Amino acid sequence: MKRLTVLANVLIVTSLLLSACATPTPEVIEKVVTKEVEKVVTQVVTQVVKETVKETIIVEGTPQIVEKEVTKVVEKVVTPTPPSKKGGTFVSSINGDPATLNGILGNDGASLNVIGLSQGPLILGGENWGTLVAGELVESWEVSEDGKEWVFHLREDVQWHDGQPFTADDVLFTFQTIQDVDVASPFRERFMEGEDPIPFEKVDDYTVKATLKEAVASFATAISVPVIPKHILEGQDVNTAEFNQKPIGTGPFKMVEWRSGESVEMEANPDFYRGEPYLDRWVMRILPSTDAALVALQTGEIDFGEISGKDVPKFLNNPDFTIVTRDRDLCDVLLFNSGKPIFQDARVKQAMMYALDRQALLDTALLGYGTLADSPFNQPVFVYQEGDLPQYAFDPEKARELLKEAGWEDTDGDGIVEKDGEPFKIDLGAFTVAAVHQRIAPLVQANWKDVGIDAAIQNVDVATFFQAAYQPDTEKPFDIQFTSWASMAPIPTITLLFMLRRSKSLALSTFTTKRSRLSLTRGARRWMRQNEKRFTRKQRPSCGKSFLFCRSFIARRSMPSITALTLMKPNWIPAVCPPSVILKRSTSRENSAA
Amino acid sequence: MGRYIARRLIQMVPLLLAISILSFLIMHLAPGDPTSMYLDPTKGVGKNPEVMQRLRRQLGLDQPVYVQYFKWLANTLRGNWGYSFINKQEVLKNITDRFPNTLLLGGVSMALALVVSIPIGVLSAFKQYSAFDYVVTTMAFFGVSVPSFWFALVLMQVFANQLGWFPAVGMHSVREQLYGWDAIRDVIRHLVLPAVVLAMPSMASWTRYMRSSLLEVIGEEYVRTARAKGLRERTVVLRHVLKNALIPLITLLGLSLPVVVGGAFIIETVFGWPGMGRLGINAIMARDYPLIMGVTMMSSVLVISGNLLADTAYAWVDPRIRYQ
């Protein structure tokens, strides 16, 4: 008896050891061709377009929380009914408690989900309101010839949820509140020109006029923030008002209740100016764990959820579910700390790019649901231009060549390249809460090891990183860092600004020469000229004006400049030569500016 | 005995003070600034260091640490626990919103663990080395080693998804409005899975502990005497053995109070249960100082009181113990 148990134990232990050593079988990955579909809930025929939510590094949450930087949207239609069926409750999920439901204060994913349904901006198409430029609370707008006077004509049939009419007073109140320094609205800068607030005037009850000192092409979308009601918030401290928990807005859904930690409940607004919503109630469950959200989707406790590419196979052949895929304005990038001497040579960065098998990374992390990036602008952003951009295919041989050219060679046979006796050792940082990054970090490390680069994976806490990184004028605490990135479409200049260096700014990494800055400007101007029609409806900025605009933006703003390496998902320029993307069309001489 | 309790209660005050000082210091020592959590330093207003400075002043963060501490202390003693940085609501409101939920979950899971572990532990001890005993021991081993989030997901998949017996997430059903008994039944249905997962490690370790404690008592002289006297086995077990074996368990109960109060955050996160554990962890990640202090102090009070209760029960149950 005893011998038998011993034998059994030995067998168990050996089999465990063997299974641990076995190479993992490769997953059979079904690639589904992504198609761009408007992210509209098919059951509901409301105007509300669920827009791309700007994704910053997810701050809140536990280490278990998976970041919402997914590339696909999955929608479950509970009963496959034709869209004209009315009524019912729709349940979706958000990944945390909203910070605030006040439209001018809330800027995180969870808050924006709720704000998007209950409130609305003047004009769609700004930072949080999708990529399509169209009037929402505004019927039309005009711009003067010199681009400095903007007149907005508001809709006259809009009512607040409590029945009061929406007028220009509310718009003015909103803008003035945002301009107030004490309110600390994250959108404040869009309403200022340098230190001065942009003056808004009321022309009549439904017309608002703004006078700028300098023409700004994207003004219409820059001011796309939700409007807050004057008759409720006037005289109150906006930061602590009760309104923040139970807002009154103009959107298709009214707030009913926010149960802390559990759910946010909204009901239909029958007086919505675009028609009554087809749903009775919309409840958002607060589910921080995406795994749990997945199960909830399967059990029917939520009707709509975003899932990661790797979970798609579960729902593929299930008639209860409809899968909607959409390219998102989100990109995973590797940031170079280009202040470090090791990265001064452009060839080094190019080599690191060639060394990465990005398709494999995409397949591993998201089962292929994503696209390789090749420009700083993501595909859904209409600035993105296909075709002409340098593609960095997986080519380790070329990588090794480039490294050799730059002076890095493996002289002592240990597999790591050296230069002047210094081995190529760097730290690869990944945030602990970013599951996708954590998953692909070892692969990146392996790819780089293959060409002789020794990268050690560092797990970084978000808060610590940001505190250390955003000190102006100090050395940044990282070599290479995984992060996520959205290009804040459709204001391309903001992304352009991200690439320029400002000496005293909060810069994650610094880069560019004077020449490339100018080239950048030229390129931006050219872009503006080519795309002016898409930008505004009636404005035709002349060549000189857009140039002026670009230059003034570039000269005055201090924005972090980042040199980033594209990883996957919508396009980003490979770190080595951001200017060349814009300049590809104009000149070919500035293509190694790093 | 009464003097002992009074002394312990008085001791609570300096203890809580020490805890508050320590927590405050550690909180401020952690790198990371709440203002960068609140306003993204890369975009918009955040990039302007002046605005950040203003924000810091508004939140009271530009003062030296000890000044901040005394301000916090003065306010707290007066009943103003401050406002959360992140959602600008009163800290007390945040806590009282979530505290009953945590209590419910923790209380039920503890009760469940007790109800399961005591009988099984007793049976296992009396049938030592039998098949039943081996099964129980193995299950206990499993229960202690299994990671709770994995176990939670497994239970969710099996019971919620495939069998459909219980809802997977949340505390209430959101699709329909329920009142009265229906609402209570609804909460109970939602409570089952999280309570089981939360109770699992306790259940497992308490079973083992009961078993060993019982074995120890069974070997005592007085048990043999009782049997020799001719008492029924049931009386022997219930009156003599069990009562004495339960004493160490009271200590264990006292030690697992922190779990009840704040440690269930993994389960709360996975099941979407609106509890205080999740609140606390989120606050820490977001460097929400007032909320962190509020949650910490609340938990400390509860844990200390719980331990006091356990000690008192101990003295009451075991006549050999005398407190001066």
Image (cartoon, coloured by chain):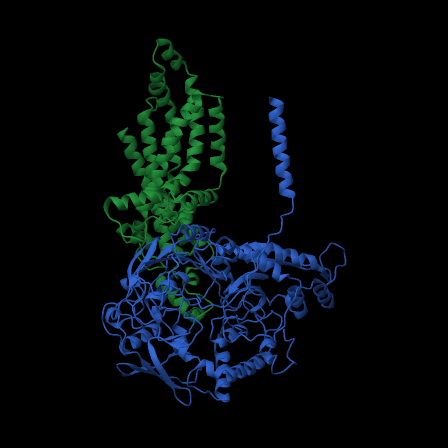
Chain colours: A blue, B green
State whether residue B300 appears in this view.
no
Q: Residue A247, located in which quarter of the rendered image?
A: bottom left
Q: Residue A530: horizontal and vertical position, in percent?
A: 52, 83
Q: Is residue B248 left or right of residue A28?
A: left
Q: As rendered, which of A408 and A422 lies closer to the eye?
A: A408
Would you say residue A401 is visible in this rendering? yes
Considering the image in quadrants, where does the N terminus of chain A appear? top right
Please tell me whether residue A295 is drawn above or below residue A85 in the rendered image.
above
Q: How many marks?
A: 0
x and y percent of residue B300 in the render?
36, 43
Single out the residue that lies furthest toward the top: B229
Residue farthest along the bottom direction in this orientation: A145
| In-front residue for pair B22/A69 | A69
- Residue B13, by quadrant, is top left
Classify residue B43 by image quadrant: bottom left
Image location (x, y in percent) of residue B81: 30, 53
Q: Quadrant of the C terminus of chain A?
A: bottom right
Residue A308, placed above or below residue A214? above
The percent coordinates of residue A438 (x first, y second) are 55, 54
